[in-house]
Amino acid sequence: MFSTLFGKKKLKEEKIAQVFVNTINTTALEGFPTLAEYINDGPDFKESPKISPNQVEWFLYIVFAANLYNLKKYFPSEQLNRMRLLIIDEFIASLEGRSEDETLENINNYEAFIAQLKSPTDELEKVISKAVFYKYGLNRFQIDHFQRLNAPNPVVMKALSEVSQNFVWNWEDVLGKYKLVG
């Protein structure tokens, strides 16, 4: 009530970029071991994929690129460009000891991968689950029927999508509470 009475609180774009990257990184890094265990113990695979909790880097890039790709749904083009640059710079800085050029190339490659997987009706969590499925080579662990089809088992995709909801940034909530300023 008070936010509509007095207007939204202002938040600098730089600050939200920082919070966005820190939250994405923390959520992905802390959540991946649970996701890996969930996949490894999944009853819908004929054998365990044996994903190690240390194989987190692909997942971090998947989650970051998917959420970065999703920005265009919430921002007009001028603000979108600023937000992308701020967020990418913050992400590169957060990955200490890595080459900036290599990190930027990885971001671009993962974002292109996300764009290939996304259909207009796909929710972001479904895209993340597809990316995990393909990047971690889960097809070879499926039952023969789905393996021959070279398509994810819908039961596996539904379960992965439910888990992937935890890795989607909630722009509706942020933009409902704050007005982002440059």
Image (tube, rainbow, N blue to C red):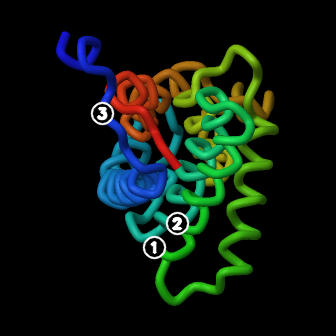
- Report whether 2 appears left or right of 49: left
Give yes or no for contact between labels 2 and 1 (Cβ–Cβ under 8 Å): yes
**x%, y% of residue 56?**
47, 64
User: For the residue marked with disc 1, what is the amino acid?
Assistant: Ser
- Report whether 85 appears left or right of 44: right
Using the numbered discs, state the Cα–Cα distance from disc 2 to disc 1 in whole angstroms. 5 Å
Q: Residue 94 carries which label?
A: 1
Instruction: Name the quadrant of the N terminus.
Output: top left
Is residue 42 visible from the viewing direction of this image? yes
Q: Which mark is residue 9?
A: 3
Upstream in the sequence, badge 2 or badge 3? 3
Residue 176 vs residue 114, the one in the foreground: 176
User: For the residue marked with disc 3, what is the amino acid?
Assistant: Lys
> Label 1 neighbourhood size at 10 Å, few (<14), some (14-19), many (20+)?
some
Q: Is mark 1 on a helix, strand or loop?
A: helix
Residue 171 vs residue 46, the one in the foreground: 171
Label 2 or label 3, whichever lies nearer to me, is 3
Residue beneath the point at 57% across and 85% down: 98
Q: Residue 91 carries which label?
A: 2
Residue beneath the point at 41% across and 37% down: 42
How many numbered circles does the render carry? 3
**x%, y% of residue 96?**
47, 84
Using the numbered discs, state the Cα–Cα distance from disc 3 to disc 1 in whole angstroms. 27 Å
